[in-house]
Amino acid sequence: MLRIFRFDFSNQNKKSIKTPLKSFFFFLLLTSFAFAERVGLESYAGALDEIPIAIVKFKTTGTTLKENDPSAVIASDLSFSNRFKVLKALTYDSTDFVKKGIGLYITGEYSVEGTNVSITCAIHEASSGAYLTGRKYEGELKQARRMAHRFSNVVYDELLGEDGPFETKIVFVEDKGSSKALMIMDYDGFGMKKITSKGVVNIFPTFADASTVIWTSFQRGKPDLYKGSITSGASKIFIYSRYVETSPSVSDIKGKVAYASSRKGNLDVYTANLDGTEKKQLTFSRGIDTSPCWSPNGYLIAFTSDRSGQPQIYIMDSDGMNTRRITFEGKYQDSPSWSPKGDRIAYCSYRAGKFDIYTMTVDGKDQKKITSLAGNNEYPTWSPDASNIAFVNRNGSHSDIYFVKPDGSGLRKVTSTGRAKMPEWSGF
Amino acid sequence: MKSLKLISAVILLIAVLFGTGCKKQQSTLQEPVVEKTPVDTSFAEPQSFDNVDTSDDASFNEAELDAEMRRLVEENMKPIYFGYNSFVLSEFEKEQLATAGNFMLKYPKLRILVEGHCDERGSSEYNMGLGENRAKIVKEYLTNFGIESIRFETTSWGKEKPAEPGCGDDQCHQLNRRAEFKVLAR
């Protein structure tokens, strides 16, 4: 006996209605995935099976939304994640769906009126066509993609019990030669806009919270840390000295920023509160210690150090104790980025005459090369659901952001300006 | 053995004296050029640096120089170049630094920002540290040469301001691994 939950059409909040889908008998199989994920039995997203789901092209009566077509956006979202196997369909065909092993499908419709749009989306059970849950979104036309992303998050939350990454943002740097601007875009490369430039070099952006970035800027003719709003671009100097202050990384759980400073000689790793107080030096080596990166639980910090003679990756407790070296292969290993699931670190390694992105376990084992594009592949950063790694491919004077899945599949070019560098994914 | 050591020490001493003698001759050869044209003499006045802002609030702004002074700075304080992933000074670069040091002795009001730069290989983060090491070794050489430490600031641009962007070979990369001198505004 199916229970049907009606969606309150006036409500646009994705968290407001929690349909207990997982209690349905035909969801038993899926439930086991979600449960495993919640208790942390399965921690490497790449190893999960994909849920087959069909997306039926949304109906519309009037104006069509070409590249912003909600069903296309949802299909692209769910394909981006490595948790779904997406079939795009023109109509609902229960026989075909069941034959292909598809247990669920998404339908919807939208209508455009002037500068407004309304979108209705629903998840159905494939064999019976039964309605499971749905949402209706109304708003400005320019919000159409956002509405579709929000529904993708609903699907993710309902089926997997996790927050979807489809409304997250990526900050990055646009290299214009003598100046470098901070930019922001939606996770899928759309909605690109400038945060700040001021005609100076701005590098190493990282999110402090959903609306704030911290980065390194040369506004005073030297590198200092600045903090600013992603919407207004208003910024102020954050951590500064007459020395080099650079490479910020924020742990929102700890409420701290880790960064590299040379105020006591050459670059060492420090931490401070997000208001700049309680600066604490964590490393004291005679080499260069930089590129700090927090573990998702805030207990550990990975960083790069050349104390052995060449740049290699090290890990220490967040108070600076128990430092251990985790990479030994190669002459140059750098730019550690910790998976949001906690189990792996992506990094950049110089082997066979070029830089490529690798991943490894937290103790440096099971190293896997995941990029092979010609040129140098650098600056890895994970999507918040750990399903993808964004990185920069630099070939000659061109540099663009790509996505790749942690198993090396699903390569996708995201920017095409030829000037994009240093991506950093928000976890918000 | 002892006498052998003594002899070699004497030879070394002579060599050093002879060597510095050569350098002095070289720098005196340049002097007529310096004095032939009228320059902004204010940089040549004796200077106390008591009022230099040594707090963290200090900005590193470049001084506006007249054309002649700029020419002299460019001629005497040439960029110092380094090997791959290295901040070691070659013998040639030490000679360049001796010229720069003599110039700074002659113009005691000059305060200098030493900027370290790197080639475009490797991460931006690590290169920020490497560039700084290059700037610092240059400052160290010049303070050992006899220039007061207060007359220097050091910073790093890492690989963010290459002299030759988009290099494909090492001849080109070489031009980016450098320390540059900027005259600080007073």
Image (cartoon, coloured by chain):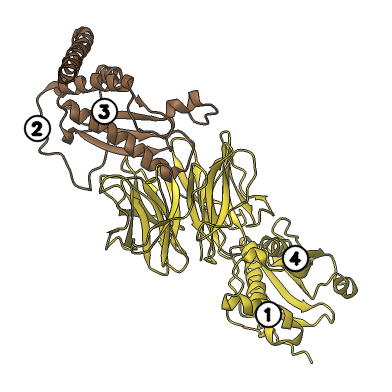
Q: Nearer the viewer, residue B84 or A410?
A: B84
Colour in which the image shows chain B: brown
Q: Nearer the viewer, residue B92 or A263?
A: B92
Residue type pointed to by label 3: Glu
Report the Cα–Cα distance between label 1 and label 3. Answer: 70 Å
Report the Cα–Cα distance between label 4 and label 1. Answer: 18 Å
**Discs 4 and 1 share one subunit:** yes
Secondary structure under tag 1 reads helix
Residue type pointed to by label 4: Lys
Report the Cα–Cα distance between label 2 and label 1. Answer: 76 Å
Quarter holding the N terminus of chain B?
top left
- Number of the label disc, if any, that sits on residue B48: 2
Subunit bearing disc 3 = B
Q: Residues within 10 Å of mark 4 (few under 14, many from 20)?
A: some
Subunit bearing disc 4 = A
**Discs 2 and 4 share one subunit:** no
Counting from the top left corner in percent of width and height, residue A188 is at 62, 56
Colour in which the image shows chain A: yellow
- Number of the label disc, if any, that sits on residue B64: 3
Numbered disc in front, either 4 or 1 = 1
Which residue position is annotated with label 4? A85
In the image, what residue occupies the spot 73% across and 86% down?
Answer: A24
Residue type pointed to by label 1: Ser
Subunit bearing disc 2 = B
Secondary structure under tag 2 reads loop
Subunit bearing disc 1 = A
Which residue appears farthest toward the front when viewing the image?
B1
Secondary structure under tag 4 reads strand
In the image, what residue occupies the spot 17% across and 15% down?
Answer: B7
Which residue position is annotated with label 1? A32
